[in-house]
Image (cartoon, rainbow, N blue to C red):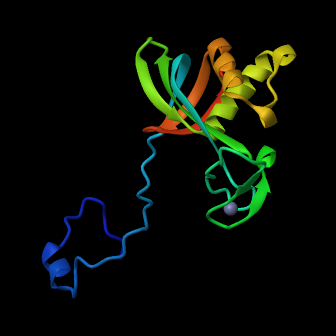
Amino acid sequence: MARSLYQPLDLGAALNQQNPFKMLLPLVSCQLVSHMVALFTIGCIVKLSSYNFCINCNSKLNMPDLGNIVDCQNCKASMARKRCPKAFYCKVRLHDEHDRPLHFTLFDKSIRQLVELYNTTNPHDAFELKNLTEYNIKEAFALLEDFKMTYDGSRVINIELNR
Ligand SMILES: [Zn+2]
């Protein structure tokens, strides 16, 4: 017999059942969506650093003062100094749309994304990403217009042009 919506529940009967409170709950993802998206301009580079890494295992290399050969202390591979790829990281002071400052650490991927944005808007003065130098990054950051950044706390998720 169908129960009318207005019929009071028989609580006594429900409590007499075995394990009345045991029921299967649907699985819910607990991942919090906390991504923020905002427009930023680069105020200044507080500190820009770089390191060379191993072609074979991507570990940071201790570059010798002399010689053309670099040995990786992690995987023992030997490689030419000029072939060791470089990764950059920097601390920047960004300003949001309301000119509020925000200090952020940018790693290689984000730095290259920003230089690519600069290249997109300045195709005639584009920097070669493969042979990027500290000076290129400083110049690109100084001339870059505002960009849209998606981030999660201090982690950059994505950087794109403000269009
Ligand atoms: Zn290695």
| Left or right: where 130 falls relative to 19 | right
Q: Quadrant of ligand 1?
A: bottom right
Q: Nearer the viewer, residue 9 or 49?
A: 49
Residue drawn at 62 percent across, 65 percent down: 74
42 left or right of 153 in image: right
Q: Is residue 49 above or below residue 24?
A: above
Which residue is more in the foreground, 81 or 66?
66
Q: Quadrant of the C terminus?
A: top right
Left or right of 16: which side holds 27? Answer: right
Q: Quadrant of residue 40?
A: top right
Left-right relation of 101 to 52:
left
Can you give x and y, in whole percent of width and height, for residue 64 in the image? 65, 48
Percent across and percent down for residue 82 are 80, 44
Total marks drawn?
Answer: 0
**Most extreme residue toward the bottom, as rendered?**
18
Residue with the most extreme left position: 12
